[in-house]
């Protein structure tokens, strides 16, 4: 069986600081990338034990060098590199399942770690009135190819968000935010995290279990038409976004677009 893994960095165990751990100039960036890569390797081990025959991973954390250390990647895993973070490159209907690793909850989520929606400039996104983030968009894209979303690893808020989309999805919770109030992504907030070694054990076991759900979980679908709305944190971003074809301003910070083919979240 052939699986596709969407990888991000913010949902990795031990990662709690956007500036110092997730940015290129951060003093702990190399360490964070190593921890994320070892989590991918644990996922690969579990998936292989569960029957995977091919694993392809997309490094979705910004541009090169992104969120994974290619030198440390499991030899059974092929890595999609150099495609930026605009969406999973190489995902198509040849895959049997989508796995999401190191994911974070959407902006505005309480008890979350480094929650945001696509960029720090966005306060909220919705499609047909449903709040959405990166987890939803990845699941929707996979579903458009008839590929089911069967696994997620990240903080507890991300796992709960995934279950709202696909209740049967297998989850590996590696950390948990402690702040009841939503925390801006660049602010460090208290969190409880598993030790990286323990997190890898949890991921390995969950990935193996997820393989048994392939064929039992249906691909996620949402029927068109789509009304996509983005609320920015600053009016200047909404003003800039409204110049894009089909985008209209609904208030000082919110833009909207209607689509009949696929949902398109307006991102700046």
Image (tube, grey):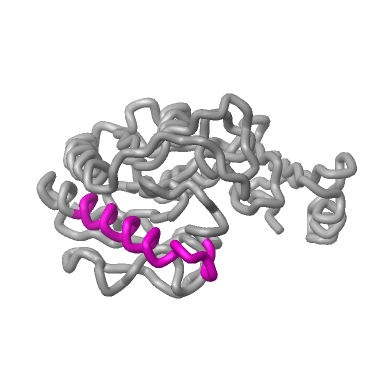
Determine the image quadrant of residue 56: bottom left
- 264 or 102: nearer the viewer: 102
Whether residue 144 appears in this view of the structure is no
219 relative position to 25: left or right: left
From what the image shows, is residue 126 above or below residue 56? above
**Which residue is depicted at the point 44% across and 62% down?**
28
Residue 184 locus on image (x, y percent): 65, 42
Residue 129 locus on image (x, y percent): 67, 30
Q: Magenta segment: does it hold 30?
A: yes
Determine the image quadrant of residue 155: top left
From what the image shows, is residue 112 above or below residue 233? above
26 relative position to 131: left or right: left
| Image quarter (top left, top right, bottom left or bottom right) of the C terminus | bottom right
From what the image shows, is residue 175 above or below residue 144? above
**Which residue is depicted at the point 42% across and 63% down?**
67
- 24 or 138: nearer the viewer: 24
135 relative position to 154: left or right: right
Main SS, magenta residues: helix
Q: Magenta segment: does it hold 157?
A: no
- 97 or 59: nearer the viewer: 59
Whether residue 8 appears in this view of the structure is yes
Determine the image quadrant of residue 82: bottom left
Residue 85 locus on image (x, y percent): 52, 63
Q: Which residues are magenta?
A: 23-44
**Which residue is depicted at the point 82% across and 51% down?**
238
């Amino acid at each position: 069986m052939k699986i596709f893994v969407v990888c991000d960095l913010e949902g990795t165990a031990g990662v709690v600081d956007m500036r110092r751990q997730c940015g290129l100039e951060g003093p702990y960036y190399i360490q964070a990338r190593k921890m994320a890569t070892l989590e991918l390797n644990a996922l690969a081990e579990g998936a292989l034990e569960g029957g995977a025959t091919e694993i392809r991973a997309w490094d979705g954390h910004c541009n090169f060098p992104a969120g994974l250390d290619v030198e440390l990647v499991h030899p059974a895993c092929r890595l999609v590199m150099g495609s930026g973070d605009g969406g999973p490159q190489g995902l198509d209907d040849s895959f049997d399942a989508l796995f999401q690793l190191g994911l974070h909850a959407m902006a505005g989520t309480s008890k979350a770690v480094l929650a945001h929606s696509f960029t720090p400039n966005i306060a909220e996104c919705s499609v047909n009135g449903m709040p959405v983030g990166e987890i939803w968009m990845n699941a929707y894209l996979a579903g458009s190819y008839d590929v089911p979303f069967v696994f997620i690893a990240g903080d507890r808020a991300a796992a709960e968000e995934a279950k709202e989309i696909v209740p049967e999805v297998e989850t590996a919770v590696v950390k948990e935010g402690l702040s009841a109030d939503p925390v801006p992504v660049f602010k460090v907030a208290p969190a409880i995290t598993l030790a990286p070694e323990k997190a890898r054990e949890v991921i390995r076991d969950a990935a193996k279990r997820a393989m048994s759900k392939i064929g039992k979980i249906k691909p996620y679908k949402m029927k068109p038409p789509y009304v996509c709305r983005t609320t920015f944190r600053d009016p200047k971003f909404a003003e800039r976004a409204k110049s894009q074809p089909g985008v209209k301003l609904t208030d000082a910070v919110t833009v909207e677009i209607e689509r009949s083919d696929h949902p398109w979240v307006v991102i700046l």
